[in-house]
Image (tube, rainbow, N blue to C red):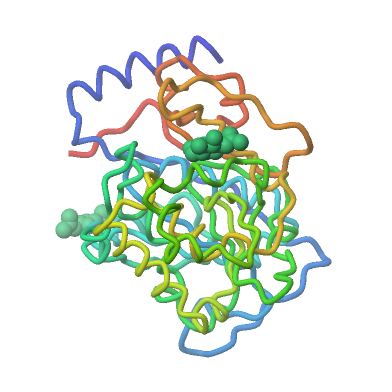
Amino acid sequence: MPSNIVLATILITTISILAKNAISLQFREAPKFYNSVKCPSITRRSAAANICYNNAIHVAMTLDAAYRRGSMAAILSVLQHSSCPENIIFHFVVSSSANATHLRRTLSNSYPYLRFDIYPFDDSATAGLISTSIRAALDCPLNYARNYLADLLPTCIQKIVYLDSDLVLVDDIEKLAATPLINDAVLAAPEYCNANFTSYFTPTFWSNPSLSLTFANRKPCYFNTGVMVIDLERWRAGECTTKIVEWMELQKRMRIYELGSLPPFLLVFAGNIAPVDHRWNQHGLGGDNFRGLCRDLHPGPVSLLHWSGKGKPWVRLDSNRPCPLDALWAPYDLLQTPYIIES
Ligand SMILES: *[C@@H]1O[C@H](CO)[C@@H](O)[C@H](O)[C@H]1NC(C)=O
Ligand SMILES: *[C@@H]1O[C@H](CO)[C@@H](O)[C@H](O)[C@H]1NC(C)=O
């Protein structure tokens, strides 16, 4: 394996230098995955919408240029570990400036049996709301698409599992999707009450009672927005998109936080979310945002590996400087190597 990677890396590096923007990634075809006999049959709810099914598991992801290889791998990991893969319906949010026909074809080539739909997201809707943050990648508008899922997806979809593109599942997504949204919670995610919650907001925020009182009467804890189970009906009823956007608008006028899309979620939901076992978001495997050091797993069982942080496994594998855990991502990589160049 290592010598193949070395050769591929040399080739890839050369090609990227020669033809930086002419490369169109080509992906292999994934095998077909079948339902086990115990799976409920999914039934179409209306003749019009080809994605409105009862008993289906709905999964939302973004599909942007920089993370496409990650998304393709994440899909494979979801299907491979699912006991009812044919009951999973994917919802991909893409930039409205991307070629949706090309993306649809890319998905269908690798996943001929996949049920999915594509939702163009108007980046300009958020462009004016995004403040600069410590890492340019966080300012990618598709990073904010998760705020708008309830508006983008058809109302027949009541519940969704949202997944970032830099992760792989090693367990059945059905278990995650079945998370009870107790106490009328809008969303469920693993919570981290030992994290220093204060540090996610600026002194300007904490010193202004009319702002910081938003956390009165709740015990806010940090949660990572890369893995969430969202009740879209409750989200719509609670006008959560509007609440998030209001905080983003305030951020443009006075700096109340430093990071990108996460803090508005914390402002609206922290302390009021339903818990999910930490095994469903073993995050931080990308390393820290400054030095890109390798990170180890947190103690405990693992159902989902998440390369949040600066380093991405496909970049490190290509450059032949992988972190040890990147070897767990590699089996899900569908990229054709050597790269095929489309002009
Ligand atoms: C979009 O992609 C399709 C399929 O790859 C291609 O035929 C078409 O020319 C592309 N359109 C544009 C505007 O690039
Ligand atoms: C938490 O973060 C704040 C602001 O960054 C800092 O002032 C405070 O000392 C931290 N608390 C702990 C317990 O580390």
Q: Is residue 307 above or below residue 121?
A: above
Count of marks overlaid on the render:
0
Q: Nearer the viewer, residue 244 or 199?
A: 199
Residue 1 vs residue 223, the one in the foreground: 223
Relative image position of residue 288 (x, y in whole percent): 48, 28
Query: Is 91 or 290 nearer to us in this picture?
Result: 290
Which residue, as the protein is rendered here, is positioned at the far bottom? 47
> In which quadrant is the N terminus drawn?
top right
Q: Give the image location of residue 78, x and y in percent.
A: 62, 51
Give the side of residue 201 with respect to residue 223, left or right.
left
Q: Residue at x 58, y 65 (%)?
A: 216
For the question of whether residue 175 can be seen, the reply is yes
Question: Is residue 333 something one can see in this rendering?
Answer: no
Residue at horizontal 71 percent and vertical 55 percent from the top: 276
Residue 149 at x, y percent in the picture: 44, 69
Residue 291 vs residue 80: left or right? left
Res 96 → quadrant: bottom left
Q: Position of residue 230 (x, y in %)?
A: 58, 68
Q: Residue at x 34, y 59 (%)?
A: 94
Q: Work out which quarter of the rendered image holds the C terminus and state it.
A: top left
Question: In front: 251, or 39?
Answer: 251
In the displayed structure, 307 sits above or below 163; it is above
Task: Report the residue at 66% width, 51% height from top.
Answer: 191
Ligand 2: image quarter: top right
